[in-house]
Image: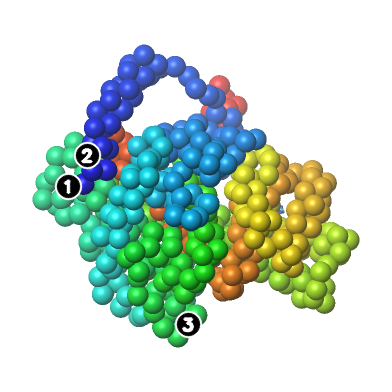
């Protein structure tokens, strides 16, 4: 028996009816206008897709099914003795639209343990790549290789009725989420620890077991992983990794192909790779300034040099947010609790004071405040996970929760193939000027 799957099935019908009602009442209503600047500007702010799992408010930040990060920290079940939310809980919340009980969360944990065996050929694919291959490339290749296991691909070939698409998609999503920590840990140990792999511990939760397989068995690091995996899991539908997963999935590509596409987007430096870039930038700054604790004046001068060199200050700015990212704040609070005297944390805190006015002074940066990536690396460094090229893989493991939940919802509600229009500059000019 798969209770979560049954519970999910019971909410599909009402959700479809709800959409039908909305469409029949308001199908021709207008929800926005499109400016030429948006057509050229990366579709910024253009309302154009449905995402049930989370919503980003420009000032307040992310809400998962209506719950803010502090609310999740308060309301989601914790690991025994722990104080951070379990990501199994945010997954349940995103899928079902309501807060889970302790039992619900335990069942998700158990499901993922049961499904976590990775077939040997995936490890062979990873091992076939040169060791210096970026961890995100290894991750993406492994996810694509795991596609041999897709139940959706098999069911489609066997002629599944479209009303049932969600079922094998649910299975694919659950299997993939269950296996990602093992794959990620394998890449980490292979790349940085001479292939000295660590067997999973099925008694642990999803994040605790991930930390264990990476080689970090301390309770504090496990708590950090639970927080990290929860807060990076979703950021509404339009960010590159979510949108890429949705777009590729809209062609009925299975969860493996769709998620690999999302991960290839996450690997870009303006998106998920920013977390490694932040640490690289901080360490380079410290070493160029002679080591130790830089003064605010030195940090300001270094930031101005970064901008003068035509580079971005990683970890600052956002396409939607206009305030400090609550994911930054949650990590800052974790640091204040567990590592207030850590030198890199103190540098990050100083950077937080120095950078916003400098970015504001450029007159063009719309959001001078820090985002999630400005803080995550420093926490990982403190516990010894210093190989920052690996950080985006951690982000990717977490992001699977949101984007794959959305894929299940896409299949359950019969979401159509995505096909926006495009136009050449010449034709656009004719359209605008010859009317
Ligand atoms: C996140 C990001 C890609 C959003 O881009 P955006 O929506 O185009 O942002 P804006 O509208 O504010 O950009 C306007 C200008 O300010 C610049 N800008 C924005 N954030 C900047 C930053 N942190 N450092 C320097 N310049 C920045 C942009 O590059 C752009 O410059 P241009 O007009 O010369 O091309 C951008 O803020 C950025 O590059 N940040 C650093 C990378 C990062 O932390 N990414 C992780 C995001 S969670």
Residue positioned most to the front: 81
Of 179 and 366, the residue lying toward us: 179
**Above or below for 360 versus 122:** above
Which residue bears the numbered disc 3? 193
346 sits to left or right of 10: right
Farthest bottom residue in view: 194
**Label 1: how many residues lie within 10 Å, few (<14), some (14-19) or many (20+)?**
few
Q: Quick one: SS at disc 3?
A: loop
The residue at the point 68 percent across, 44 percent down is 324
Q: Which residue lies furthest to the left in this view?
A: 158
Q: Where is residue 357 in the image (x, y as percent from the top left)?
A: 82, 47
Q: Is mark 3 within 8 Å of ligand 1?
A: no
- Which one is nearer the viewer's eye here, 367 or 375? 375
The residue under label 1 is: 1
C-alpha span from label 1 to label 3: 40 Å
Q: Is mark 1 within 8 Å of ligand 1?
A: no
Colouring used for the render? rainbow
Of the image marks 3 and 2, the number of the one nearer the N terminus: 2
Q: Earlier in the sequence, mark 1 or mark 3?
A: 1
- Which residue is at the far top? 25
Q: In this view, does 301 lie to the left or right of 428?
A: right
Label 2, on which residue?
6
Q: Where is residue 275 in the image (x, y as percent from the top left)?
A: 59, 61
Tag 2: Cα neighbours inside 10 Å, few (<14), some, or many (≥20)?
few
């Amino acid at each position: 028996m798969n209770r979560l799957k049954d519970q999910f099935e019971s909410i599909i019908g009402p959700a479809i009816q709800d959409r039908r009602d909305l469409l029949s009442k308001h199908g021709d209503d207008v929800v926005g206008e499109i400016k030429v600047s948006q057509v050229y500007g990366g579709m910024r702010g253009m309302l154009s897709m449905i995402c049930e799992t989370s919503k980003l408010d420009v000032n307040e930040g992310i809400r998962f099914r209506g719950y803010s990060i502090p609310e999740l920290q308060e309301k989601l079940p914790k690991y025994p003795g722990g104080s951070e939310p379990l990501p199994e809980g945010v997954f349940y919340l995103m899928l079902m639209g309501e807060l889970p009980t302790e039992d619900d969360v335990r069942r998700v944990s158990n499901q993922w343990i049961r499904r976590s065996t990775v077939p040997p050929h995936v490890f062979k694919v990873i091992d076939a790549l040169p060791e210096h291959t970026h961890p995100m490339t290894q991750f993406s290749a492994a996810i694509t290789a795991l596609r041999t296991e897709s139940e959706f691909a098999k069911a489609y070939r066997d002629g599944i009725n479209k009303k049932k698409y969600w079922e094998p998609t649910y299975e694919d999503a659950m299997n993939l989420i269950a296996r990602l920590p093992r794959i990620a840990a394998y890449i980490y140990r292979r790349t940085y620890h001479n292939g000295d792999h660590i067997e999973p511990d099925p008694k642990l939760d999803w994040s605790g077991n991930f930390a264990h397989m990476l080689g970090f068995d301390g309770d504090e690091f496990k708590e950090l992983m639970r927080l990290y995996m929860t807060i990076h899991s979703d950021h509404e539908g339009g960010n590159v990794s979510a949108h890429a997963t949705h777009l590729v999935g809209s062609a009925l590509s299975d969860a493996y192909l769709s998620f690999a596409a999302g991960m290839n987007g996450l690997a870009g430096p303006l998106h998920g790779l920013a977390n490694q870039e932040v640490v690289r930038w901080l360490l380079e700054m410290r070493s160029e300034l002679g080591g130790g604790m830089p003064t605010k004046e030195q940090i300001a001068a270094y930031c101005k040099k970064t901008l003068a060199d035509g580079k971005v200050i990683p970890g600052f700015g956002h396409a939607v947010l206009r305030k400090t990212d609550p994911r930054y704040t949650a990590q800052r609070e974790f640091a204040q609790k567990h590592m207030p005297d850590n030198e890199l944390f103190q540098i990050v805190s100083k950077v937080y004071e120095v950078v916003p006015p400098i970015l504001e002074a450029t007159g063009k940066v719309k959001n001078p405040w820090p985002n999630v990536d400005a803080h995550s690396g420093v926490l990982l460094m403190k516990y010894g996970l210093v190989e920052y090229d690996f950080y985006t893989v951690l982000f990717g493991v977490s992001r699977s929760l949101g984007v794959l939940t959305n894929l299940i919802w896409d299949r359950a509600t019969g979401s159509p193939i995505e096909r926006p229009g495009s136009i050449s500059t010449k034709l656009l000019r004719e359209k605008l000027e010859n009317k």
